[in-house]
Image (cartoon, rainbow, N blue to C red):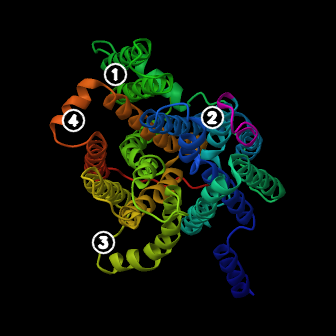
Amino acid sequence: MTTVVAAEVSTSLERMPPQIPFIIANEGCERFSFYGMRNILTAFLTGTLLTHLPMVERKIAATEVFHTFVIGVYFFPLLGGWLSDRFFGKYRTILWFSLVYCAGQGCLAAFSYNRTGFYFGLGLIAFGSGGIKPLVASFMGDQLDSRTKHLAKLMFDAFYWIINFGSLLATATMATFLDVFGPRIAFGIPGVLMLISTIVLYLGRRRYVMVPPAPPNPNSFLRVVRTALVTRVPGRGRPGLALAGLGAVLACGAIALLVLDMLDLVPAVCLALVVLAGFGGAGATLQLDRARVRHPDEAVDGVRAVLRVLILFALITPFWSLFDQKASTWVLQADGMSKPPWFKPSHMLALNPALVMILIPFNNLVVFPWMRRRGWEPTALRRMTTGIALTGLSWVIVAIMQLRLDAGTQFSIVWQVAPYVVLTLGEVLVSATGLEFAYSQAPPAMKGTLMSFFNLTVAIGSLWVLLANASIKRPAVTDWIAQTGLTTTAFYMFFFAVFAFAAALAFGLYARHYREVDHYRV
């Protein structure tokens, strides 16, 4: 009898929880909706909405609109994570933000020829999509506990696979729909998929494990940080507070760049917040032990662990600078390559999700077991280090192709397959791994918030793009680039490649001393 019961328990532990398919199906539809509109956005802007501008200015404006939108999408996760952790819980927060998301998709279809209405719709999508972004993966993680956590890698890989399945379908079809049926239909279809996504989430409501929001915590992350910064110790100064104050001054300087018309509103505000948070976190780290006078050791140690994770997150941001430009800079490069009349530059984006769907199982079934048999364990941090470096390599390839284009050599768009393969290999090693890593390292009361910080790395990545674009507009910079013998575009590509290599080096060095923890639900 005992043997039978044990066998039944063992079998149940190997089976995925029955609510997981609802979450994965919800994510697949939402990702079709998101990538369906995002991957035609640059083409729509340059071909329809921004035709009042000269072509050179139009391409720059389209890139800026695209990356400003991306910043919004990945900045609002901070709000969604906070509301979830403090007030409403993950399920209700996801559901309500999804309704805003649906309204935004509706605006894109209704106001396809009205810039004000269209940009308002983009804002609603950024708000809705950003609000749910940190929560769906962590909500799925909540369905596991310490007995079933061994299924986490399989589950997160399936989650990332369905993301790319939705992206593949959207990318393969939406550029054609835009060309044949026009923007109202092309943006309406993602709206319908988002509505289906919301309905699927709702249908599984009675099956989910609902982890309640955390009650007010006197030992919360921000309160511990504040105590660490302001607490006085007789005979000792407060270098951490001084460092945080310097951050506040530099943040004001970022806002001053807006006043001086050197930066637009979104990059100026985002830069100010990033500087303020970065210097504040560094200052708190210097004085963190001072918080032990008012907070328990476990709370202080938890904050220290989170701050260490945030350093890793900061070093991931260059990866996103390069990765997200496949839908802007790479699409614009593809426009100058030879291709069949029916083939649109946006169609190349379908390569990315298709390759992800191949590379994830290939890595898990072939590459990683082969490495383990030879005594090298592909840990999460090692995979992410390699992924960032591969992303830099992909940009070296597109930069070399740009040199040929600048020299007047015409060649097929098929050559862009090579950098897409390298970029996607880097993506599966960074992004898919990062989701699992961020969830496992987050203390129970901060899972939504820490996942928000992981998503914020994407916003900061687009911030670096906007800052780079603002720099190359300045005559002094363009004159200096001209002296190198490179065009601005080629120099820009080599610059981002070096940016990624430097980030990979820094990430790898820091990761060598990072100690991983396990924060799965007991």
Q: Is residue 294 left or right of residue 185?
A: left
Question: Is residue 392 at all visible to an observer of this figure?
Answer: yes
User: Which region of the structure is painted magenta?
Assistant: 107-116
| Residue count near mark 4 (Cα–Cα under 10 Å), binned few <14, some 14–19, many ≥20 | some
Which residue in the structure is indicated by mark 4? 481
Q: Disc 2 designates what residue?
A: 82
The residue that label 3 is drawn on is: 376
Identify the residue shown where x is 72% and y is 43%: 105
Counting residues from the N terminus, which is met first, the one under dot 1 or under dot 2? 2
Report which residue position mark 1 lands on. Answer: 240
Amino acid type at circle 2 is Trp
Q: Amino acid at mark 4?
A: Ile
Image mark count: 4
Distance of label 1 from label 4 (alpha carbons): 39 Å
Task: State how far apart marks 3 and 4 are (Cα).
Answer: 43 Å
> Against 197, is 447 above or below?
above
Prevailing SS of the magenta stretch: helix
Residue 269, magenta (yes or no) = no
**Residue flagged by tag 3: what amino acid is it?**
Trp
